[in-house]
Amino acid sequence: MSAPYKLAFSLHGHAADVRHVATPNAGIPLLLSASRDGSALVWGPSTTCREWDVKLRVEGPEKRYLSCAALTRSHGAPYLLVGSQSGILASYPLPAPASAPPAQDELPEPVHTLIEHSQNLCCIDVSHDGLVATGSWDKSVIVWKDFKKALSIKAHEQAIWSVKFVGEDRLLTASADNRIILHSLDLASGRSTPLQTYTGHTQPVRGLALRPDGQGFWSCSNDGNINIYSFDKPAPINTLSGHTSFVYSITALPDGSGAISTGEDGTMRVWSDSELVQTIPHTSNSLWSCTTAPPPPSSPSSGPYIVSSSSDSTIRFFTNSPELVAPEEELAVWDAEVKGRQLDKSQVGDVKHSDLPGMEALGREGKKDGQVLMINNNGQVEAYQWSTPESTWQQIGQVVDAIGQSRKQLYQGKEYDYVFDVDVSEGMPPLKLPYNTAQNPWIAAQTFLQDNELPGSYLDQVVQFIEKNTAGQTLGGGEAQGYVDPFTGGSRYTGGGVPMAGGQANNADPFTGGSRYTGGGVPTHTPSYGGGDPFTSSGAYSSTPPPASTPAAKKQKQAVLPVKSWLAFKQINVAAVKGKVAQFNEQLKGTGAELTTDENKALTEVYAFLSLPSVALPNPEGGDGQEKFDPNTLTGIISRWPEDKRFPLVDLLRALSATSPATSALSPAIITQTLQASSGPLSKPQDTNLLLTLRALANKFNTSSGRGVLNQETVGQQVLTALGGISWQGVGKNSRVAAATVALNYSISAQFSLLPSSLAPLLLDLVIAIISTEKVEGGDTETVYRAAVAFGNLISADKVSGGLAVGKVEKGRAVVKKWTGKEPRLGELGREIEEKLSQGYAV
């Protein structure tokens, strides 16, 4: 028998439950983690190789609750994938392996934000060739290729908990309907065929792991069992038991000797094909995920680490190689923490103290590894667990009365901290109200009322019911705070950008180093003017050339035009901006430009406003948001500060323009001044300020007050004339994307008859200028696509299209046509534009 696993080291980088850990390749020392705190981390060996440290940190599009993470490649470039509770799949570029970790002045923005799932995206897997499969609580599985949906599977009756590729043409799916299904995939037709349904679990199936011999797979379930299957048999060939609660995760050992599992009983367990080999107790109840990781190069003969992730926000590595075991003093601390763990009665059952044996019972050997024995030690009930590898009883905690509700509950195949029975009418069965403590109670109450078709007048009562019955528990509604840059230890923030992986920054986004903002995925407050993603009709923004559309994709394709969903650039690192403003203000002391006491107070209110959770922000359609600050104070500081120190203030203006009705209602004088000052060659500070100004301008369309100002004839003429005076060849790519977004948002105004007809020719000129700037070979397709959508919107807007000069429309048609062969989405858009023009428009 091999040596028992012992603690090697622990990783601390998350602020809440670590819901998922994964190693993309068994031979590559890289670990991915996704957390309830809204962040995903990429870990790798430190310089000493004794422990691992953070190589990259990202936040999900909505900065909250990430469920899973994976790594894929598209067109040769590596991407980190994260799935969120809202159903969004986002991708982030990874730096080159040999490069040093960048100083993350601003967290990376997602390159792709894929919005297809309608509920928690809780599992993800990637095939050898880069196909991506995702499963969701919405009961669907989606297979993606190059960030486009290739096919969708709806074969289960409840939430999907696990997906696993078997080669490139088969996929295993596990569900809360207690079933596992093997599907055949045909990407060319966009269809899947069920090949085999596996039974044997009596409760939701939570995890899958392929056997290294290629003959079958392991599974784990809420029924507490581990099943081993052969692909050709629908029933398990073996069932292993040992866990005393839900089993959340299963991972096969690379050498084929067995598997590891983790669950709600607070243990990681090591299995052979036939029995439980070792039980590793932890200090917390919920061990959400497990995986393996390669040993350091200094110990090539050592076996892999086994890794657990926990509800105590910690990732732990264990090893059975003596040279990699943690120092004795660390092991002693770990053992003491395990012994001090408090187990409530729900985990061990109700017992009478007088019926329990005394300490003398520890002199007898246990019957099997993991067996739990409760001892009455002078009136204190202590729990011990038998370790077969070490032939000893190990104390795993003290038994206390239950505190709160420690065990998750299931409702319709999903996990909740609480599932309440609510009596709404005498003689009728109670309704189920599911609730997680991380939720905002108002949203949970509103969802409950909508699902059960109850009057909205009950809202206050339901919220009070939730708050009363969860007294003492942490309630939702806030965002994770206290971010510390993992590479610098601070929150450094500059306007100079960081190099992109694999080459020069090429006028990269000054805060992310990436090529584009996505606006944080799903806009928090967006008027219901249209359906899915306005650019692909499939929920994906793509800045890399997608592959040719499959026949299935064509059948499912919806018309692109008209687009009626405003676009925005909303994300901001408030702490970083605050630090940079303070730094610049210190440098300006004694010049007369430094902040006054009142200005400092106003900025403090701005920081607090931008740190609010989305549900607490004003309704962007509601006019006055009753902000506590005067936005004129911010514009006054911007106009007074030197050009090279304005960018953090302009960044605040950008973020406020999307969320603060009072800010959006301001005259865009400061914006127009910046645009007018950008007509000639630009310095680096000017280019940065222009980028942020354009984004602020685009963001103003996200509030009704902002749209009202920008569509005033005089204001619109000033803005569009200033934009028309800029030489777009001389500005960075990100600024051109932002300008195209402004044009697109103006064209949406035309769709809703908000744009004065006198402004339409100026908008058409701007669109033509933006597209004409891009070279067909090597130009930015994202810029062209957004501007081309603006062109399509404009010619199909009845109120203004009649005032467009035929010659200018034909010129726009010609510049768009040059790009239709570059990407399928441009080809589809070009065909729609041709159809509309061939049908005639009001001239």
Image (cartoon, rainbow, N blue to C red):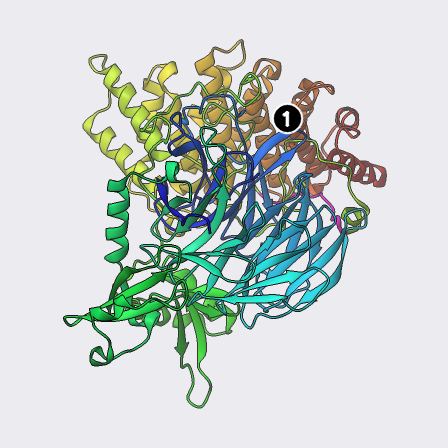
Whether residue 58 is visible: yes
Instruction: Report the residue at 42% width, 81% height from top.
Output: 424
Which span of residues is magenta-colored?
Answer: 556-565
Q: Would you say 85 lies left or right of 794 here?
A: left
Instruction: Report the residue at 69% width, 54% height from top.
Output: 215
Number of other residues with Cα within 10 Å of mark 1, as a class: few under 14, some 14 to 19, many 20 or more: some
How many marks overall?
1
Residue toward you, 339 or 59: 339
Tag 1, which secondary structure?
A: helix
Residue toward you, 218 or 521: 218
Residue 314 colored in magenta in the image: no
Q: Would you say 604 lies left or right of 796 here?
A: left
Query: Which residue sits furthest left?
Result: 378
Residue 670 position in % (x across, y down): 42, 24
- Tell me the residue that label 1 is attached to: 762
Residue toward you, 427 or 269: 269
Query: Which residue sits furthest bottom?
Result: 427
Which quarter of the figure has residue 685?
A: top left
Residue 394 position in % (x across, y down): 29, 59
User: Of the residues shown, which amino acid type is indicated by label 1?
Assistant: Leu
